[in-house]
Image: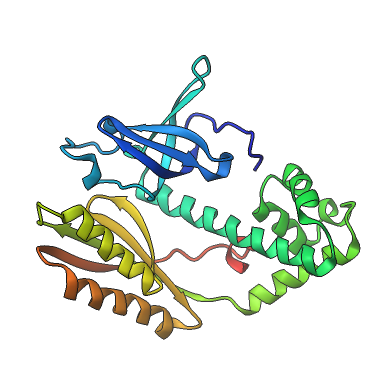
């Protein structure tokens, strides 16, 4: 995706919270060259918000939907409350996949002796995304085979696909419900608890207060589950005034395409 593009209204975006104010939060969009957008407090949750920091915090990555775009002022507003849990899950999966594939492409370029900073923009302009590029490479389509890039680079891309197919990991997902009744430092405590879960190797993403998604992977089911259990034990032991509950989430089996193979 080109950095100079502007997301259209209704587009799902990853919004990284950079500054919180009384009326909302300023966020940056890493997929769009870190352009700044605004998340109004009314778009954070459907319910009444007394303290916005009980819902979001600086440094947090959110899945939002582009709500308005004022061309005259060149400002963009996004919404968190209009994003469904399913949309959040799909967007996070696609975003993380793009990051992984970008690393694979960099490695393939290095192995082939190619300057990825020169070739990557052209490839993304042609295919639209890393996932699309790798999908075409996996199927060796005419669009991929006719690319005017070194054969060694094409070969390294295919090797990267094969290597990652063999190293495919097992993933487990849970919905965590965390509520804290600590009125003095509840937000700080919650942030620390989620940080501990991440330190245990669990990927944490916000759904809607008080729910979070806990995802972990490993070489097998036992290893993936062990990370979740470690995070569960740590949070249960450290939460002072509040409740914590985990419910396993069934993962939908993806189609046999590049999204499932990489």
Percent across and percent down for residue 49 are: 18, 37
- Compared to 172, does 85 lie above or below? above
| Location of residue 107 with respect to 211 vertically, above or below | below
Q: Position of residue 113 (x, y in %)?
A: 85, 65
Residue pictured at 80% horizontal, 49% vertical: 118
Is 150 in front, or is 249? 150
Can residue 155 be seen in this snapshot? Answer: no
The residue sitting at 88% across, 55% down in the picture is 149
Instruction: Tell me the residue at 71%/74% (across/down).
Output: 162
Q: Quadrant of the C terminus?
A: bottom right
Q: Is residue 2 visible?
A: yes
The percent coordinates of residue 63 (x first, y second) are 42, 46
Q: Please tell me in which quadrant of the rendered image residue 203 appears.
A: bottom left
Which quarter of the picture shows residue 246? bottom left
Colour scheme of this structure image? rainbow
Viewer-closest of 165 and 102: 102
Number of numbered discs overlaid on the protein picture: 0
């Amino acid at each position: 995706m080109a950095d100079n593009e502007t997301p259209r209204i209704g587009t799902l975006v990853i919004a990284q919270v950079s500054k919180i104010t009384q009326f909302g939060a300023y966020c940056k969009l890493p997929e769009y060259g870190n352009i700044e957008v605004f998340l109004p407090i009314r778009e954070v949750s459907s319910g009444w918000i007394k303290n916005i920091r009980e819902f979001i915090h600086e440094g947090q990555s959110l899945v939002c939907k582009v709500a308005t775009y004022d061309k005259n002022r060149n400002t963009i507003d996004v919404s968190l409350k209009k994003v469904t849990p399913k949309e959040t899950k799909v967007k996070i999966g696609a975003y993380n996949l793009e990051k992984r594939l970008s690393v694979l492409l960099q490695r393939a370029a290095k192995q082939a002796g190619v300057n990825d900073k020169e070739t990557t923009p052209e490839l993304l302009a042609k295919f639209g995304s890393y996932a699309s590029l790798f999908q075409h490479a996996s199927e060796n389509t005419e669009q991929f085979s006719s690319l005017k890039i070194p054969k060694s680079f094409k070969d390294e891309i295919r090797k990267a696909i094969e290597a990652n197919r063999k190293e495919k990991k097992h993933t487990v997902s849970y919905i965590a419900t965390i509520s804290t009744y600590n009125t003095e430092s509840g937000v700080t405590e919650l942030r620390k608890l989620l940080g501990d879960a991440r330190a245990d190797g669990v990927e944490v993403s916000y759904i809607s207060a008080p729910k979070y998604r806990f995802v972990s992977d490993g070489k097998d089911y036992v290893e993936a589950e062990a990370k979740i259990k470690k995070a569960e034990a740590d949070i249960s032991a450290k939460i002072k005034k509040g409740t914590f509950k985990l419910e396993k989430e069934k993962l939908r089996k993806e189609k046999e395409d590049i999204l499932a193979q990489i």
